[in-house]
Image (cartoon, helix red, strand yellow):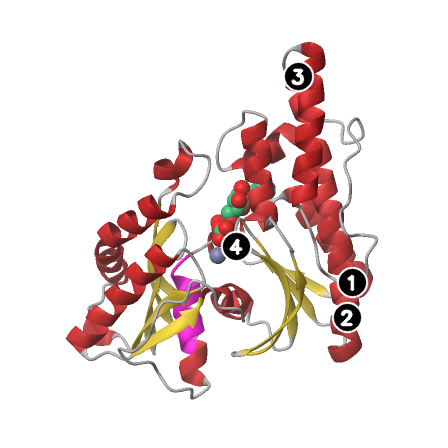
Amino acid sequence: MIVLGIESSCDETAAALVRDDGTILSSVIYDQMDLHAAYGGVVPEIAARAHAERLDLVTEQALAEAGMTLGGISAISVTAGPGLIGGVVSGVMFAKGLSRGTGIPLIGVNHLAGHALTPRMTDGVAFPYLMLLVSGGHCQFLSVLGPDQFQRLGGTIDDAPGEAFDKTAKLLGLGYPGGPEVERAALTGDPRRFPLPRPLLDRPGCDMSFSGLKTALRRARDTLVAEQGGLTQADRADLCAAFQDATADVLTEKTRRAMAAFAAEHGPTTIAVAGGVAANRALRTALQDAAAEAGFAFTAPPLKLCTDNGAMIAWAGIERLRSGEAVDDLTLSARPRWPL
Ligand code: KG4
Ligand code: ZN
């Protein structure tokens, strides 16, 4: 069985062909970063238009790279939400047209399920496992119990960490996307010079908050600017190091709690981390250590599959077909909000 996956919920237009043994036959990602860089974040209208213009091209390319035609495909799996509604609608309409024109069954999948099920495609991780999804748009702990069985243990109550990294970079005059820039600057910084808060650590549970951190950082920057008339390279490095340290502290401590809550019910199994922020080396090392302490195996899909892509959507479709769930029809609709 080979499934075509289509993704367009944020700023990546992607298509991929995946076989039911987890082999990725092709994965094409058109990254819109250049279109949004000037704004320091994703502009929904620009994203939707770019998706509509590229969906047919990335799909054609995915087929060509796999040496296939639509005739060899068992199903078309498409992100039906959550995400920026213009982009999701573009993808769903495109998939419906393709399904209607060819008679190939249509499956609408939840984008978050795509991220959450990826470790099964890449590493064959067995249910149940714990997932930390940490990106520019998402931040949550999920107990993954089955292909369509997820339990949310907690998550951010305001910004996602990736968003906070991006805003920090913008505040300090660094480039977009901010995560890699902040990580690079932090390498030479002293995380102790600016004491930043660790929001919500004093409260029980797995919920997190990152907007207060951003505000504290802005205050520290404004004080420096008022005192010195600007920022030096060393100031920037120290601010980045302080921000990265605080973010990693919060995520790691809350991950400890999530592992304890998960283990109380299911025993320690595997913790998987996905999303763009999982690329951060300081965070990754801290999480790996915490997992080892708690007796969990640690896994993180390769970065290309941690960030948005079509292969994870194809795989989520495969999981659904395998579990015998019904496929969708042309009444499938795009959902901007769709909690797991
Ligand atoms: O998963 P992703 O590609 O897109 C979604 O948000 O769905 O994640 C992108 C986010 C951006 O906010 C980016 O700044 C952040 O991941 N990011 C990082 C790093 N690389 C990317 N954050 C911290 N450290 C990094 N090395
Ligand atoms: Zn995503």
Q: From the viewer's perspective, is the residue at label 1 or at label 4 nearer? A: 1
Mark 4: C-beta under 8 Å from nearest atom of ligand 1: no
Q: Which residue is mark 2?
A: 261
Vertical comparison of 331 with 87: above or below: below
For label 1, the SS is helix
- Label 3 Cα crowd, 10 Å radius (few <14 / some 14-19 / many 20+): few
- The circle drawn on residue 302 is 4
Q: Answer yes or no: do the residues labelled 2 and 1 have beta carbons within 8 Å?
A: yes
Distance (Cα) linking label 3 and label 2: 44 Å
- Label 1 Cα crowd, 10 Å radius (few <14 / some 14-19 / many 20+): some
Q: Position of residue 8 (x, y in %)?
A: 36, 57
Vertical comparison of 139 with 223: above or below: below
The part of the chain drawn in magenta is 309-318
Distance (Cα) linking label 2 and label 1: 6 Å
Q: From the viewer's perspective, is the residue at label 3 or at label 2 nearer? A: 3
Q: Quadrant of the N terminus?
A: bottom left
The quadrant in which residue 132 appears is bottom right
User: Which three-letter amino acid code belongs to the residue tagged 2?
Assistant: Ala
User: Which three-letter amino acid code belongs to the residue tagged 4?
Assistant: Pro
Mark 3: C-beta under 8 Å from nearest atom of ligand 1: no
Q: Point out the tag, 3 or 2, that comes first from the N-terminus.
A: 3
Q: Answer yes or no: do the residues labelled 2 and 4 have beta carbons within 8 Å?
A: no
Q: Which residue is mark 3?
A: 225
Q: Point out the tag, 3 or 1, that comes first from the N-terminus.
A: 3
Q: Which residue is mark 1?
A: 257
Q: Position of residue 92 (x, y in %)?
A: 30, 66
Q: Position of residue 24 (x, y in %)?
A: 39, 64
Front one among 245 and 218 = 218
Q: Point out the tag, 3 or 4, that comes first from the N-terminus.
A: 3
The quadrant in which residue 181 appears is top right
Q: Position of residue 186 (x, y in %)?
A: 66, 31
Residue drawn at x 43%, y 80% as measured from the top left? 320
